[in-house]
Amino acid sequence: MADSEPTVFPNPSPPLRDIRSDELAAFAEDGVFCARDLIEERTIDRMREATEEVIRDTHVLGNGALDLAEKGFHGDIFVWKLNDAFRDLALFSSLPSLASQLLGSESVNFFYEQFFIKRAGSPVDTPWHQDIPFWPVSGTQIVSFWITLDSVTRESSGLEFVRGSHRWEHRYQAITPNYDPYMMDTDLPPSPDFAKQREETELLGWDMEPGDALVFDSVVCHGSGGNSSPTQDRRALAFRYAGDDVVYAPRHATMPLLWEHGLQPGQRLGGSLFPQVWPHVIESEISRRWEGPEPPSPKALEEFFEHLKASGFGPGGNKRSLFE
Ligand SMILES: O=C(O)CCC(=O)C(=O)O
């Protein structure tokens, strides 16, 4: 029998630039910084096209559980499992190398990505929150890159952060832009609305251009208003990476994992849902995805929608999910 050809994955793109020491210091001290000129123009162009395509046709929970399309908001998660532009940015771009510089971790795994689209005039705000209470993981080494595909200001729903809040001990209830009860952990208190406490709170926010990225910790408090620009959409992608200390820690009221992952509680992230991306990808973890799109597990999806319906939140939108 002839030996099968080894699979050749794309070489990761080298970063446009490394993370500077002042940026590393801001990440440690403030929990967030705005990295200028981090992402190549051709990647931004590809992701604009891919995002619009995903909103139209290909969704995991978009156009359903995560959308408020009638209010000009679109969101979705784990799109990398279905769309190749999202996959390539997650696994083969400069982000894994940049994440390794930020996390100081021996290896880095891709955690997941999500997008947040607020069309011009969308009133949908992003309630103040920390990210970690949303997730069925624990650990400190998680970094998010919030990549804007459009020019963004506070008026067009630029994110703001409470400086240094990543060092706070307390945790707040995670609240999604559609106030999804599935994700609300009633054991935790709701977050204050820090935008209403500007006098006594140090908020950080930046006007941004495509190619810039907000880089932030999983505990720092952040939020934004709606997009009050009459003409400018606000399209943003958040790609998240995890280091060595991040383990699977299932809890109630956290983001649903709609693919089989085979992890036991306490186990380091890895495998086909959270593949290693630094210092290199592991063929067995991504070979199935390399063959083509990987839809979510029908059973997990069914359970999720049942749960949503039970809490009064059925999938909406014009189209039903492709996977129902
Ligand atoms: O873009 C948004 O409105 C929310 C982004 C966010 O909260 C996040 O990426 O953690």
Image (cartoon, rainbow, N blue to C red):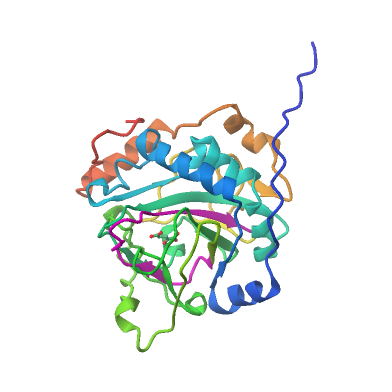
When the figure is inspected, residue 123 is found, relative to residue 28, above or below; the finding is: above
Residue reaching furthest bottom? 200
- Where is residue 91 drawn, in percent x and y? 62, 44
Residue 261 visible in the snapshot:
no
Look at the image and say whether residue 222 sits in the magenta stretch: yes
Q: Using residue 323 as the reference point, say whether residue 208 is left or right of it.
A: right
- Where is residue 313 drawn, in percent x and y? 22, 47
- Where is residue 148 drawn, in percent x and y? 48, 57
Look at the image and say whether residue 123 sits in the magenta stretch: no
User: Residue 19 or 165: which is nearer the viewer?
Assistant: 19
User: Residue 197 or 65: which is nearer the viewer?
Assistant: 197
Residue at the image point whose x is 50% and y is 65% from the top = 218
When the figure is inspected, residue 51 is found, relative to residue 245, above or below; the finding is: above
Residue reaching furthest front? 231
Residue at the image point whose x is 51% and y is 30% from the top = 293
Residue at the image point whose x is 70% and y is 40% from the top = 282
Q: Quadrant of the C terminus?
A: top left
| Quadrant assignment, res 161 | bottom left
Residue reaching furthest left? 312
**Residue numbers of the magenta segment:** 216-243
Q: Using residue 315 as the reference point, say whether residue 134 is left or right of it.
A: right
- Where is residue 127 drawn, in percent x and y? 32, 66
User: Residue 226 or 91: which is nearer the viewer?
Assistant: 226
Residue reaching furthest right? 2
